[in-house]
Image (cartoon, rainbow, N blue to C red):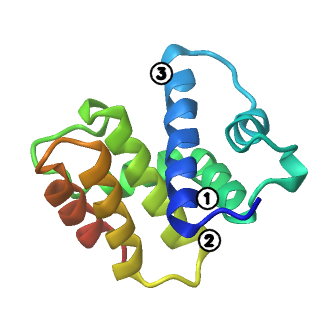
């Protein structure tokens, strides 16, 4: 089954969210299994974008936290809602590790996801953080 680009972003955000939940609980997890379960296909058949962005987001999360934290005025990254963290990790990984994407496109995807899944005005916060972090 071919996923739309919007669906790819939503699935990737959800997988990253699940991985962050396991990490916060100190539990081991298998990223390949999370991808397979969420897409309901064997890992080898999973959407390439979803695999690239989710694995990159988890592998490079410390780097992303450091970069994103520089633009959090009076906030600690750990205090952000986990879903917001997932959106920020998705955006960071998409921009720096999946490549071939315009900064404006990455930020627009994050804003769309934020408007759909976060509180009413959180998209403005996400937009500002990404605008200042993605270079």
- List the residue tagged with mark 2: 98
Q: Decide: marks 2, 1 in contact (CB < 8 A)?
A: yes
Dots 2, 3 in contact, CB < 8 A:
no
Give the side of residue 68 with respect to residue 101, left or right: left
Mark 1, Cα crowd under 10 Å, few <14 / some 14-19 / many 20+, is: many
Count of marks, rendered view: 3
Label 3: few (<14), some (14–19) or many (≥20) C-alpha neighbours in 10 Å: few
Task: Give the CA separation, mark 2 to mark 1.
Answer: 6 Å
**Residue 69 numbered tag:** none
Name which residue lies at 58% across and 59% down.
8
Name the disc covering residue 53, or none: 1
Q: In whole angstroms, how far apart are the C-alphas of marks 1 and 3? A: 20 Å
135 with respect to 19 (left or right):
left
Q: Secondary structure at mark 1?
A: helix
Q: Which residue is mark 3?
A: 24
Report whether 28 appears left or right of 103: right
Residue 82: x and y in percent read 36, 33
N-term mark: 1 or 3: 3
Q: Give the foreground label among 1 and 3.
A: 1
Toward the viewer: 16 or 113? 113
Query: At 58% across and 32% down in the image, what residue appears?
Result: 19
Q: Nearer the viewer, residue 133 or 83?
A: 83
Q: Residue at x 77, y 59 (%)?
A: 1
Sequence order check: which comes first, mark 2 or mark 3? 3
């Amino acid at each position: 089954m071919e996923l739309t680009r919007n669906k790819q972003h939503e699935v990737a955000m959800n997988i990253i969210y699940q991985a962050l939940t396991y990490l916060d609980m100190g539990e081991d997890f298998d990223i390949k299994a999370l991808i397979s379960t969420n897409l309901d296909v064997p890992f080898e058949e999973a959407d390439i974008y979803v695999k690239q962005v989710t694995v990159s987001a988890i592998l490079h999360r410390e780097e992303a936290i450091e970069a994103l934290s520089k633009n959090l005025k009076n906030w600690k990254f750990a205090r952000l809602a986990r879903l917001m963290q997932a959106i920020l990790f998705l955006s960071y990984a998409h921009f720096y590790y999946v490549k071939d994407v315009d900064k404006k496109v990455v930020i627009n995807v994050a804003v769309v996801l934020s408007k759909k899944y976060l509180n009413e005005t959180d998209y403005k916060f996400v937009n500002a953080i990404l605008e200042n972090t993605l270079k």
